[in-house]
Amino acid sequence: MSDPFETEERQALRESGRGFAAREIAPHLDDWERDGLVPRELAKKAAAAGLLGVGYPEDVGGEGGSLVDSLVLAEGMVAGGASSGVLASLFTHSVAVPHMLRLGTPDQIERFVKPALRGEKIGSLGVTEADIGSDLAATRTTARRDGSDFVVNGSKMFITSGTRADFVTTLVRTGATGPGGLSILVIESGTPGFTVSRKLDKLGWRCSDTAELAFQDCRVPVENLVGPENGGFVLLMHQLMSERLSLAIQACGVAQRCLDLTVAHTKSRITFERPLISRQVVQHKLVEMRQRIELARTYARAIAARYDAGEQLVAETCLAKIAAADACSYVVDQASQLHGSMGFMRETEVERHYRDARIFRIGGGASEPLADWAAKMFGYTA
């Protein structure tokens, strides 16, 4: 049976991503890490190269293709030296615009989706709140209808690209408590009452800006409502499946990159007059690293292909992300160890991946609540 991830076209796409990352990202990444920002120009370069719109319909300004195409592109970019932090920043629109693609109005497509895919506007997703985390049904930020506007009050925390965003696709409470009272509003930067409270400092993903946002009597036009009022939770849950698959594939890509770097290092590193890779304990570690990557990646790719074919796989996408995050955590740790003291140095690429990889077990839904949701879906509850 042919692998949908390894068609001739997708191999070429993967190579395009690898080349773009090697040229436009890897040489500058250390500077971006120090600056705490990915320059806006990178999005325009990616759009000009035909990469920013991969997986999006041509009639909304995309390059065509499907989720699998976007995942293949991510694999290639990581292989070319891009970090998961760069991907989070460059492709933030992947979590900001799908809701509009699914149920948005033509006006929303023109004002937000098309400019984002051209690299002209940066979109962000405002969901998480302090003390809520993965419990999205407990969202407290409110949006009260007042004539032709919604008046928004509340705050959002840990928002990727929040300091640079031109618009934030925001989960708000428009109705009663629980998931049935949630809606999605697009809130534009510059709207009175919308402020970036602070830029957050992080362990990893340091090149990707992360913000706390505040809304105080922020008036948002009703036409910025995405989908039906009080229908935001279902819309968000659909998008989260693709986000978790993306994170799973990225985690596997990072793990593969670290394995490749470690194999090269252990071949060139001479200790006690022998290459490090000549020692059995090192060989066994490398085999274990590869085994964990292959198992996690095979499962994640299989679930992604089924999702691409139209299956609803809430529980399975949770498992794919958990497995990939765990595999990546193990591999980056072993990669750092096998690099020795250099694995602890900022000048070594595996050091950055070691820090960045920690987010895979938290972002897009932490592993523990994902396991809880999977258990409920499978009927493994009392």
Image (tube, grey):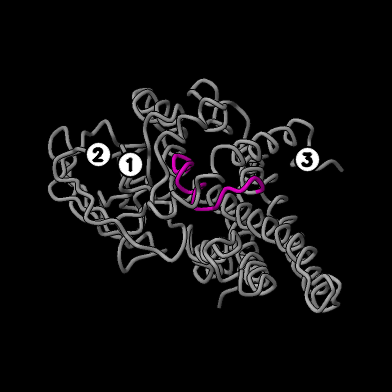
Q: Earlier in the sequence, mark 1 or mark 3?
A: 3
Please report the bounds of the magenta region as a residue range. 79-94
Q: Is residue 115 depicted above or below 214 in this figure? A: above
Asked which quadrant contains residue 295, the reply is bottom right
Instruction: Residue at the far front: name it.
Output: 273
User: Is residue 174 left or right of 207 when viewed as pictured?
Assistant: left
Q: Secondary structure at mark 1?
A: loop
Residue 34 in the image, given as x and y percentages of width and height: 41, 55
Mark 2: amino acid: Ser
Mark 3: amino acid: Glu
Q: Is residue 93 magenta?
A: yes
To which residue does mark 3 refer? 6
Q: Is residue 66 magenta?
A: no
Which SS type dominates the magenta stretch? helix
Asked which quadrant contains residue 310, the reply is top right
Q: Is residue 132 depicted above or below 50 in this figure? A: below
Q: Secondary structure at mark 2?
A: loop
State the CA–CA distance, disc 2 to disc 3. 40 Å
Neighbourhood count class around disc 3 (C-alpha, 10 Å): few under 14, some 14–19, many 20 upward: few
User: Is residue 72 left or right of 131 when viewed as pictured?
Assistant: right
Q: Which mark is residue 165?
A: 1
Whether residues under marks 1 and 2 lie with C-beta atoms below 8 angstroms apart, the answer is yes
- The quarter in which the C terminus is drawn is bottom right
Q: Secondary structure at mark 3?
A: helix
Q: Earlier in the sequence, mark 1 or mark 2?
A: 1
Mark 1: amino acid: Ala
State the CA–CA distance, disc 1 to disc 3. 34 Å
Neighbourhood count class around disc 1 (C-alpha, 10 Å): few under 14, some 14–19, many 20 upward: many
Out of 372 and 40, give the one closest to the viewer.
Answer: 40
